[in-house]
Image (tube, rainbow, N blue to C red):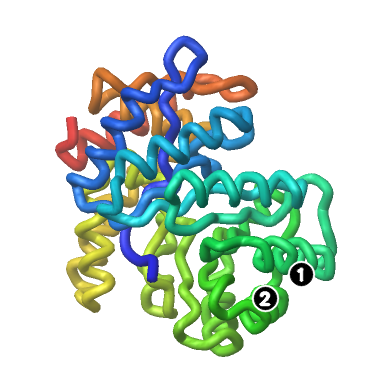
């Protein structure tokens, strides 16, 4: 099952268009530096501003470039159930290993609506599903009772959750209700170490975009139960975790990547803009502190 350092991949743009050459280089760099999975077309990939053709092209490029070396968990969520199903089918054709389905945003479904939405998709997906709860962005909160019921209904299909609720007590609630084999992944870099103690097995990470090797070393230590080393690495990475959100994400991550690679542009799509000078200074200081620049 999924574990370790799993970057939510930033999507490189060049002059407004998806830069496929840079993206493929980025996938290789991530794998070479120890990442244990890849998430294209997630929040950090600016899924909100890529069109459907681009969405499917990005997933296909990621799966083709990864070539089975590590799993690809394709962002396929939508606030429209039929669009989510379309993304799932395209991800399957592209060769993804699983799909990440964010809770529907903006239309604010009830828990009954969430059960119906995810059940509909699970019945029609041939890929395993990782739920994604990030109420700070979606407003919709996928509550533990709903998560547990979905896993009960579809134990071989709804197999995992990325939890970015910030509520670590949910890890324990999910573990008790869904069982210890239900795969729990953090969605918050700063909370990942505490999550391991409670039962999470990795993190879908923003920071790993910029510091994949150090993030992989941190997660390897935590998975091995070497919490002394994990704590040391976590504290070293903490300024970078904070800098990744010094401005609207993923602008700081893309700026950091542009500092490391001349082939990765800091360009983001409106309504996002490149990060502020203060955010750039925070990223620069964190990179310098880690010896990355």
Q: Residues within 10 Å of mark 2 (few under 14, many from 20)?
A: many
Say which residue label 1 marks. 115
- Looking at this view, is 265 or 70 the one in front? 70
Q: Is residue 239 left or right of residue 97?
A: left
Q: Which mark is residue 21?
A: none
Q: Is residue 169 above or below residue 35?
A: below
Where is mark 2, residue-wise? 150
Q: Residue at x 75, y 57 (%)?
A: 140
Which mark is first along the chain, 2 or 1? 1
Distance, label 1 to label 2, CA atoms, is 7 Å
Q: Nearer the viewer, residue 127 or 182?
A: 127
Residue 240 picture quarter: top left
What x and y, as percent, mark residue 142? Answer: 69, 65
Say whether marks 1 and 2 touch (CB < 8 Å).
yes
Residue sitting at x 61%, y 20%: 270
Please state the horizontal and vertical placement of residue 122, each as a whole percent of the image: 65, 66
Q: Secondary structure at mark 1?
A: helix
Residue 273 can be seen in this image: yes
At a point 27% along the width and 70% down the height, the residue shown is: 222
What crowding class fits label 1: few (fewer than 14 Cα within 10 Å), some (14-19), or many (20 or more)?
A: some
Farthest top residue?
15
| Residue 286 picture quarter | top left
Q: Position of residue 205 (x, y in %)?
A: 40, 51
Q: Quadrant of the N terminus?
A: bottom left
Residue 277 in sight from this viewpoint = no
Q: Secondary structure at mark 2?
A: helix
Residue 262 falls left or right of residue 144:
left
Residue at x-position 52% and y-position 84% = 175
Percent across and percent down for residue 75 are: 54, 48
């Amino acid at each position: 099952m999924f574990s370790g350092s799993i970057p939510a991949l930033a999507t490189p743009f060049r002059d407004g268009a998806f830069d496929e050459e840079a993206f493929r280089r980025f996938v290789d760099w991530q794998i070479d530096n120890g990442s244990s999975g890849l998430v294209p077309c997630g929040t950090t990939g600016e899924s909100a501003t890529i069109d459907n053709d681009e969405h499917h092209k990005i997933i296909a490029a990621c799966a083709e470039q990864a070539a089975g070396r590590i799993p690809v968990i394709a962002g396929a969520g939508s606030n429209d159930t039929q669009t989510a199903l379309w993304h799932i089918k395209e991800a399957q054709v592209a060769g993804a290993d699983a799909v990440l389905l964010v809770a529907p945003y903006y239309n604010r479904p009830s828990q009954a609506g969430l059960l119906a939405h995810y059940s509909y998709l699970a019945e029609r997906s041939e890929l395993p599903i990782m739920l994604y709860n990030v109420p700070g962005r979606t407003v919709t909160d996928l509550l533990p009772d709903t998560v547990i019921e979905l896993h009960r209904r579809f134990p071989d299909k709804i197999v995992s959750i990325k939890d970015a609720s910030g509520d670590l007590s949910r890890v324990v609630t999910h573990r008790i209700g869904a069982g210890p084999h239900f795969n729990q992944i953090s969605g918050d870099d700063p909370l990942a170490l505490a999550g391991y103690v409670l039962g999470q097995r990795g993190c879908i990470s923003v920071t790993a975009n910029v510091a994949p090797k150090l993030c992989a070393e941190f997660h390897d230590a935590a998975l091995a139960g070497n919490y002394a080393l994990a704590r040391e690495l976590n504290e070293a990475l903490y300024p970078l975790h904070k800098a990744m959100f010094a401005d609207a994400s993923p602008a700081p991550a893309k700026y950091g990547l542009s500092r490391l690679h001349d082939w990765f542009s800091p360009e983001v799509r409106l309504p996002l803009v490149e990060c502020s000078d203060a955010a750039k200074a925070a990223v620069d200081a964190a990179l310098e502190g880690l010896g990355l620049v």
